Image: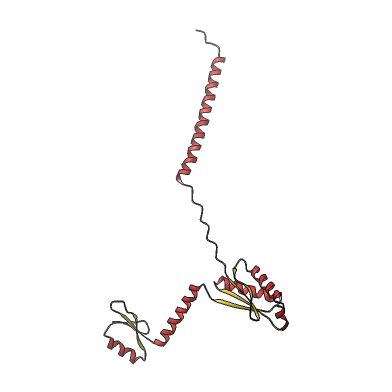
């Protein structure tokens, strides 16, 4: 098998027993990373750390396949205008990064009896985010809180560039220009002919 050291250095092709001994002397593991290669490729490394990194990469790939993470923004029904603007700016950043945003309005004591205030607040936020996201989950009660989910808006497809005029179109225009020029020359020649004939009639005959 072909062996790669922990620092990425190629140790060459060797018997598995020798590779195991090298790994044991370094207090590391011998892990097969390319079993289908010829010869198979093994690497000397810390298997625990290697497994952790592989699981981390798998989780990141899974998140990308699902279209991003879900970010939560918590609000109160009596939130101030300045705080709302701050929450909206944060939501825009999340949506631009491809993440969904979950807005949670938390009720306390008497606020629970006025859910319409929380719904108006969430509708206002949704309107402010129209250019960046779409409502995936309409505002609705979830226990003692109201929840709304905004998903990133799909970017419009790029408009195709107008195709350059074809050669046939250019030829057609050129032919029209040429026909117009020939017509003008014909009219001019006809006019010159009439002028010559008129001049010849006006001139007196020359005596012999």
Which residue is rendered at x = 55% and y = 15% of the image?
201
Q: Identify the coloring.
A: secondary structure
Residue 161 lies, in percent from the top left, at: 51, 55
Residue 18 lies, in percent from the top left, at: 28, 88
Which residue is rendered at x = 70% and y = 80% of the image?
112
Q: Furthest-top residue in view?
A: 208
Residue 89 lies, in percent from the top left, at: 63, 73
Residues 111 and 151: in front is 111
Query: Taking 40 as reference, is 88 left or right?
Result: right
Image quadrant in which you'd find residue 51: bottom left
Q: Furthest-left residue in view?
A: 15
Query: Taking 109 as reference, is 22 left or right?
Result: left
Indicate whether 174 appears above or below 144: above
Is the N terminus in the top left, top right, bottom left or bottom right quadrant? Answer: bottom left
Q: Furthest-right residue in view?
A: 110
Image quadrant in which you'd find residue 53: bottom left
Image quadrant in which you'd find residue 155: bottom right
Residues 106 and 184: in front is 106
Indicate whether 194 appears above or below 127: above
Which residue is rendered at x = 53% and y = 18% of the image?
197
Residue 61 lies, in percent from the top left, at: 46, 76
Indicate whether 6 appears above or below 67: below
Total labels: the figure holds 0
Which residue is rendered at x = 65% and y = 68% of the image?
127
């Amino acid at each position: 098998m072909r062996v790669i050291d922990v620092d990425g250095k190629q140790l060459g092709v060797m018997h598995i027993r020798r590779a195991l001994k090298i790994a044991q002397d370094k207090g590391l593991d011998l892990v097969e990373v390319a079993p289908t290669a010829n010869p198979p490729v093994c690497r000397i490394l810390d298997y625990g750390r290697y497994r952790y990194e592989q699981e981390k990469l798998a989780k990141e790939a899974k998140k990308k396949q699902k279209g991003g993470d879900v970010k939560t923004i918590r609000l109160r029904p009596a939130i101030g205008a300045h705080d709302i603007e701050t929450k909206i700016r944060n939501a825009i950043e999340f949506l631009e990064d491809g993440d969904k945003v979950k807005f949670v309005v938390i009720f306390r004591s008497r606020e629970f009896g006025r859910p319409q205030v929380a719904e108006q607040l969430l509708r206002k936020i949704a309107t402010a985010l129209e250019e960046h996201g779409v409502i995936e989950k309409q505002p609705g009660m979830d226990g003692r809180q109201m929840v709304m989910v905004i998903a990133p808006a799909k970017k419009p497809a790029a408009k195709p560039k107008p195709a350059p005029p074809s050669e046939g179109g250019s030829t057609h225009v050129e032919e029209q220009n040429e026909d117009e020029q020939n017509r003008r020359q014909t009219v001019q020649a006809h006019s010159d002919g009439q002028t010559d004939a008129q001049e010849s009639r006006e001139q007196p005959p020359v005596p012999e």
